[in-house]
């Protein structure tokens, strides 16, 4: 049984675990927090409306699954609740150029990531974003200022060209059932507090290197402990 105090605690855990990796193409002009009063918002991506994907493996079953596997709030529903009825939220899992060009969107939220897995089923020699995640991001970010929320149990490869194109990036890990923990932070009701518990590599080839500040090969995309915040440029400092 999902008692509300337990869900409230889970929601708080989500808020505190989110890591803000990028906030604006220009550091002096932060992209987040997002406005709750936008006329229209585009939400897309394979993980925007899927509790199972939010939860990952070892949830309900060993390997997990997609879909409504538990009581909870998807990120899409959390967005709709956060902005209220005056904002039109248009959701397309795989967005079309027609939808993007037909409407004026001040910003878009793209939620992509991994499928649930456990043990060997999670083995992946490439660690790219599955389900054409990079393609979805590219399609949207080419036309609309874009926040990307990445759902994963580990760092994934984010190409430099993709990182430059998007306006903000949040590592949400596997937030579980409480999608509102994400909207609590991206809309500015709470501060980002998360810092990377591991180095975020640029290329999978770096995984077998000694990744440490003291060696010349240390060239991560984001270093261990990195994380941005609204009221402080970098929690890592």
Image: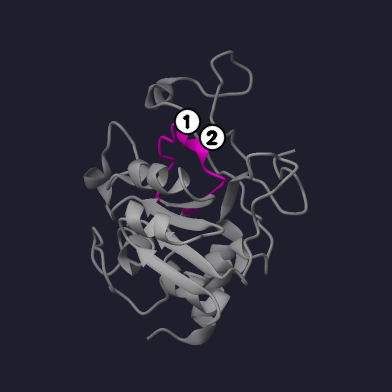
Residue at x 35%, y 47% (from the top left corner): 136
Residue 177 visible, this orientation: no
| Residue located farthest toward the top when viewing the structure as drawn | 216
Quadrant in which the C terminus appears: top right
- The answer to whether residue 8 is left or right of residue 208 is right
Total marks in image? 2
* In the displayed structure image, the side of residue 58 where residue 9 appears, left or right: right
Identify the residue at image location x=26%, y=39%: 123
Q: In the image, which residues are magenta?
A: 152-172
Percent x, y of residue 231: 77, 53
Q: Nearer the viewer, residue 224 or 143?
A: 143
Q: Residue at x 33, y 50 (%)?
A: 114
Label 2 packing within 10 angstroms: few (<14), some (14-19), many (20+): few
Give above or below for 203 relative to 40. Answer: above
The local secondary structure at tag 1 comes to helix
Q: Is residue 86 above or below residue 202?
A: below
Residue 161 - label: 1
Q: Is residue 109 magenta?
A: no
- Coordinates of residue 39 in the picture (x, y in percent): 56, 70
Image quarter of the N terminus: bottom left
Q: 105 or 123: which is nearer to us? A: 105
Q: With respect to residue 126, does 57 lie above or below?
A: below
In this rendering, the answer to whether 23 lies above or below 189 is: above
Residue 154: in magenta span: yes
Q: Which residue sits at x=70%, y=40%?
A: 236
Element at label 2: helix
Residue at the disc numbered 2:
164
- Asked whether the residues under the numbered discs 2 and 1 touch, taking CB atoms below 8 Å apart as contact, a structural biologist would say yes
Q: Residues within 10 Å of mark 1 (few under 14, many from 20)?
A: few
Q: Judge whether residue 37 can be spotted in this image.
A: yes
Measure the C-alpha gap from mark 2 to mark 1. Answer: 5 Å
Query: In the drawing, what numbered circle is on residue 24?
Result: none
């Amino acid at each position: 049984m999902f008692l509300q105090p337990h869900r409230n605690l889970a929601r708080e855990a989500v808020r505190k675990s989110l890591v803000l990796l990028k906030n604006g193409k220009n550091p002096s002009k932060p992209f987040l927090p997002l406005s709750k009063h936008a006329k229209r918002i585009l939400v897309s991506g394979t993980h925007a409306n899927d509790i199972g994907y939010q939860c990952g493996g070892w949830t309900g079953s060993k390997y997990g699954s997609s879909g409504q596997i538990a009581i909870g709030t998807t990120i899409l529903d959390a967005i709709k609740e956060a902005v209220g009825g005056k904002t039109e939220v248009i959701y397309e899992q795989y967005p079309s150029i027609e939808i993007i060009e037909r409407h004026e969107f001040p910003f878009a939220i793209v939620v992509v990531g991994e499928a649930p897995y456990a043990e060997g089923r999670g083995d992946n020699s490439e660690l790219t974003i599955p389900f054409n995640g990079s393609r979805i991001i590219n399609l949207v970010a080419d036309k609309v200022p874009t926040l990307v929320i990445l759902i994963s149990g580990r760092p994934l490869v984010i190409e430099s060209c993709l990182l430059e194109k998007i306006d903000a990036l949040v590592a949400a890990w596997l937030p579980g059932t409480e999608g509102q923990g994400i909207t609590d932070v991206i809309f500015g009701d709470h501060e980002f507090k998360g810092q990377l518990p591991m180095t975020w590599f640029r290329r999978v080839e770096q995984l077998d290197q000694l990744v440490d500040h003291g060696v010349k090969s240390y060239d991560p995309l984001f270093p261990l402990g990195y994380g941005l915040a609204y009221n402080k440029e970098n929690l890592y400092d």
